[in-house]
């Protein structure tokens, strides 16, 4: 085990997680807790008891969440860019003395 690796129990098994730059042990513990919670919810919902299958389903669920967050972030970024472009255009018109539309 490397110096900064993190040990935690998941579903009763002791797992050594590789260290992650910038994350303190308390943060890694929180992440493992989220994993435990996710696996528990999936197990309850699907009645699957196979640990490997539960791990894959949990990974899939986290990947879906990440995908949705990335999509939302991209949509927000595009909206913000449009707002900034509109503001720049209005400011340029104002500085040139051209009347702009009122909002």
Image (cartoon, helix red, strand yellow):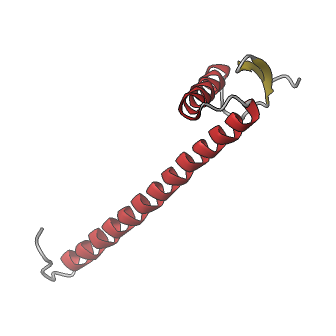
Q: Nearer the viewer, residue 34 or 45?
A: 45
Q: Would you identify the image quadrant in which residue 30 lies? A: top right
Against 11, is 46 above or below?
A: below
Q: In which quarter of the image is residue 37?
A: top right
Residue plotted at (87% across, 25% down): 2
Q: Can residue 5 be seen in this view?
A: no
Q: In x, y percent, where is residue 9? A: 73, 18
Q: Which residue is drawn at 65% across and 32% down?
A: 48
Does the rendering let one see residue 97?
yes
Image coordinates for residue 86, horizontal then vertical, percent: 28, 72
Q: In this view, does 48 lie above or below 12?
A: below
Report the quarter where the N terminus lies.
top right
Q: Is residue 71 left or right of residue 39?
A: left
Residue drawn at the location 49% of the way across and 58% of the way down: 71
Quarter of the rendering containing residue 12: top right
Q: Is residue 2 left or right of residue 47?
A: right
Q: Is residue 41 left or right of residue 80?
A: right
- Location of the C terminus by quadrant is bottom left
- Number of labels in the image equals 0
């Amino acid at each position: 085990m490397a110096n900064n690796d993190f040990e935690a129990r998941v579903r009763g098994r002791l797992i050594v997680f590789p260290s992650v730059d910038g994350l303190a042990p308390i943060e890694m513990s929180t992440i493992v807790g989220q994993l435990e919670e996710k696996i528990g919810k999936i197990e309850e919902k699907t009645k699957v008891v196979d640990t490997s299958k539960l791990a894959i389903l949990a990974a899939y669920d986290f990947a879906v969440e990440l995908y949705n967050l990335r999509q939302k972030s991209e949509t927000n970024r595009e909206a913000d860019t449009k707002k900034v472009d509109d503001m720049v255009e209005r400011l340029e018109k104002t500085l040139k003395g051209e009347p702009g539309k009122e909002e």
